[in-house]
Image (cartoon, grey):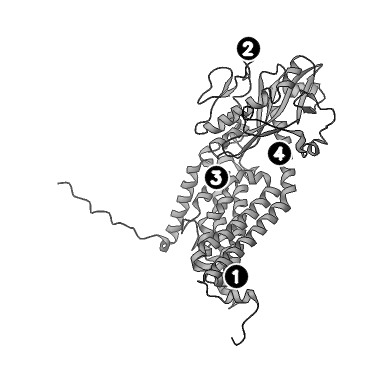
Amino acid sequence: MVARAPYWKTLTEPLIRQNPVTLQILGLCSALAVTTTLATALTMSVSLTIVVTLSCGIISLIRRHIPDTIRMIVQIVIIAAMVIVIDQFLQAYFAEISRALSVYVWLITTNCVVMARTETYASHNPPLPSMVDGFGYGLGYSLILMILGGLRELFGKGELFGAQVLPLADQGGWFTPLSLMLLAPSGFFLLGGMVWAIRSIRPEQAEAPEHTPPARMEPA
Amino acid sequence: MAARDWNPLRRLLALPNESRTKTILVAFLVSAISAALVSGATVWLRPIQAANRAAEEQARIAALVQGIPGMSDLLEQSGGTLSTVVIDLDRGRAAAEVTPATLEAALADPANWTVLDAGQNIAGLGQRPNFVQVYLLRDGDTVSLLLLPLSGQGYGGRIDAIMALRGDMNTIAGIAVTQHSETPGLGARIEESSWRASFPGTELRDASGELRFRVARGPASGVHEVDGITGATRTGRGVTQMVRFWLGPDGYGPLLDAIERGEF
């Protein structure tokens, strides 16, 4: 148990306490773009988790031999190769979802979550902890994506994974879909709400204000 | 470190990370391994992707036919299927020696392609096949619907589409875009049904027989135009040129003439 504890901590830390999306505000572009349905959110989450875990492992394996001058280039080449392999795989076996994700799978290459983990953790730690760390951050990202995707699909279409959950008003039920949920702004609202909720429960996550507001002048 | 190590890999790894040799060699090795991985995945998965695309094209043809008003009734009358014919483009009639099954093999032979000169090459293709597979629906002796595959150069790459023509061979019944690489959100909207909805009813030629079809800049004016997409001028021009090339004398022109004369 003693030896396992650090791995467990590395794995669970990024879920809420160090969550890449809600605490570090990384990878927002994809988090907002692919969460209109649960199926795309799940595919994106799984793809990113696989990419970040494998890239962390590979980069950590060769971390002692990556020349400092071309460090970023080597990391990006490895991440990009992983992303292309995953994209080809999706196009072959999940053609429908791959079309829905369109460019966002390629954009995993520049996803800050992946870059942050390979640069800050995997290039200084042995392979196994690096992979656990990458996997943990992948799960943290996935958790937020799934919550966002679930909320947006449920309230936007009354469906979960494409199956009707709430009976629609125009089919004799009571639920009127909120079309706003399927548009990009609702992603911002929901994510903002989640960040606010998490930071009110865990006040240590709130950032210190950058500016102190000027003292209010009393009306003369 | 008494004796010199003769294993080149170990000598490479022993070099300091800042040395120029190691920097170049590490960069080369990482790129080579990544390239092998990517090529391997692409080659291995290509047959499955090709099968997916073929299935998708069939589904789009079906959706295109379903979307044309009154078409499902016509389909039912004719037995529920479109007939598939390979056309010899130069002669404008069904190819005698090429069937849909042997089309792929025939097109692998460069002799079955025609190189287009600068004046003909308005769709930016450079060459066109001599044989094309089209789909048609007969109503008695006359052709009531003709589905023609088109391809042309768009802004981001090649656009493949299928256009449906009504029996008069002048009125567009619908269009389906089967493949494109246009900019998402701008040119890629050629795929959306809201844009494609402006095609049905549009006419290709004016009374003198000249091809007048055009993707307008902005909203369509007149019966020969369809709405343009804001911010996708070059995609629109690509679609215009594609339709003008394929329905003109170097494309399906001879075939359309033959159908109009009732010889097909």
CA gap, disc 2 and disc 3: 55 Å
Q: Give residue B210's position: percent from left, percent from top.
A: 62, 16
Q: Residue at x 46, y 56 (%)?
A: A25
In terms of sequence position, does the residue under pointer 1 or pointer 3 come before the other?
Answer: 1
Dot label at residue A152:
3
In terms of sequence position, does the residue under pointer 2 or pointer 4 come before the other?
Answer: 4
Quarter in which the N terminus of chain A is drawn: bottom right
Estimate how packed mark 3 is, as few (under 14), some (14 to 19) or many (20 or more) residues with alpha carbons within 10 Å. Answer: many
- Do the dots labelled 3 and 4 sit on one chain? no
**The disc numbered 4 marks a residue on which chain?**
B
Closest to the camera, between mark 3 and mark 4, is 4
Q: Which residue is mark 2?
A: B208
Q: Which residue is mark 4?
A: B56
Q: Give residue B261's position: percent from left, percent from top.
A: 76, 14
Q: Residue B126 is drawn in which quadrant?
A: top right
Furthest residue in direction front, as rendered: B117
